[in-house]
Image (spheres, rainbow, N blue to C red):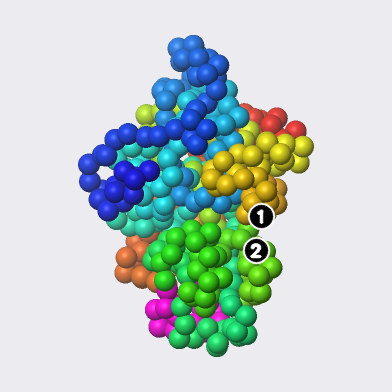
Amino acid sequence: MRRLAMCASVLLLAACGGSSTSPSGASAPAAAKAGAAAASAAPGAPERDQVTSAYGTTTGSSAPLWLGVEKGFFGKHGLNVKLEYAQSSATNAALLANEAQFGISDAPATFTADAAGASLRIIAAMNKSNPYAIVVRPEIKTAADLKGKSLALAKPGDTSDVSARMALTPLGLQIGTDVTALSVGNSGPRLAALLSGQVAGAILSEAFVEQAVSQGMHVLVSLEQAKIPYIANGVIVTQSFAKANPNAVLAYLKGLIEAVRFYADESKKAESMAVLATYFKTNVNDPAVDSNYRFYHARLAHDLFPDKEGADTPLDALKSIDPTRYANTNSDSIIDPSFMTTIRSSGFQKSVWGE
């Protein structure tokens, strides 16, 4: 994971190489791995049975990826998937360096890479609406009270920054002019900064909002409640990898679809929460595990088709931030729905969901 972070500073330079396994120490059950090797010569089998998948957020929205590994769904379709945690642009760097073949990231990060000349494509979307809210300390009663104060986000130009601007602009506040942005990290550290009084407000995933409110904070504005189309968690690949490995891409997506279905199944709650706790590096009784499970397990899309409008919304926000940089960017340049179209037409999704 440290090497992926190093790659982020050299986004378009040479590969770093290497990868790591899941927290449990195994990237797929041994039997599934053996089955993948045996199936490699079969028609339609993945062109390669070993891939690395990077992911950019440690919230419940990443759980299908973790479950796909821990419960063997990728192995079922012939893939041994190793996982790497890499925030935002580091995920894109890993893909461009071929250190990872799949990434779980968001539309803003993909547009940023595209504007820099990278050939990345969003081939599927798990989280299709903006999951964020601006949460503030008790003394902040109105938007005007936030003026001149600080707001915790992850980093400039990423999905937390874009979401904060989408939430604050209608309230007459601009980041950098009216509100000072403080780069803190993911929602967990941002919540800690808010509770400690380090910042007056924070952009939080709704899975963390309940914890904040229970400790006296309050919601200034919720984008999640507005159900704004927004690819918050998409599957990202390089155009060259997708072209050279179409069966591997389809296998990955099928494993992910089955993992989403498992996650949504209330009868599998204990198993899902145990995996969440493992990747959160905590115990299953941690309130963060419960809130992330409750918010995300039934929220993620049944149909992972990457809808154009989910890319258009964050692109409009990026164009308002930097019109020159994104002047020639459009959502069609990063959306590749061909793989999900193939899966849709095969009836695989319907068979998994029983719909």
The answer to whether residue 23 is above or below residue 314 is above
Measuring from the top left, give residue 258's x and y in whole percent. 63, 33
Q: Secondary structure at mark 2?
A: helix
Say whether residue 75 is visible: yes
The residue that label 2 is drawn on is 211
Measuring from the top left, give residue 184's x and y in whole percent. 43, 64
| Residue 346 placement, left or right of 181 | right
At 44% from the left edge and 45% from the top edge, which residue is drawn? 85
Which numbered disc, 1 or 2, marks the residue that appears first in the sequence? Answer: 2
Q: Which mark is residue 54?
A: none
At 62% from the left edge and 80% from the top edge, which residue is drawn? 138
Q: Residues within 10 Å of mark 2 (few under 14, many from 20)?
A: some
In the image, residue 170 lies in the stretch drawn in magenta: yes
Quadrant of the rendered structure where residue 112 is? bottom left
- Chain part drawn in magenta: 164-181
The answer to whether residue 286 is above or below residue 76 is below
User: Between residues 303 and 299, which one lies in front from this camera angle?
Assistant: 299
Q: Amino acid at mark 2?
A: Gln
In the image, residue 151 lies in the stretch drawn in magenta: no
The answer to whether marks 1 and 2 mark residues whose Cβ atoms lie closer than 8 Å is yes
The residue that label 1 is drawn on is 287
Q: How far is mark 1 from mark 2, CA to CA?
A: 8 Å
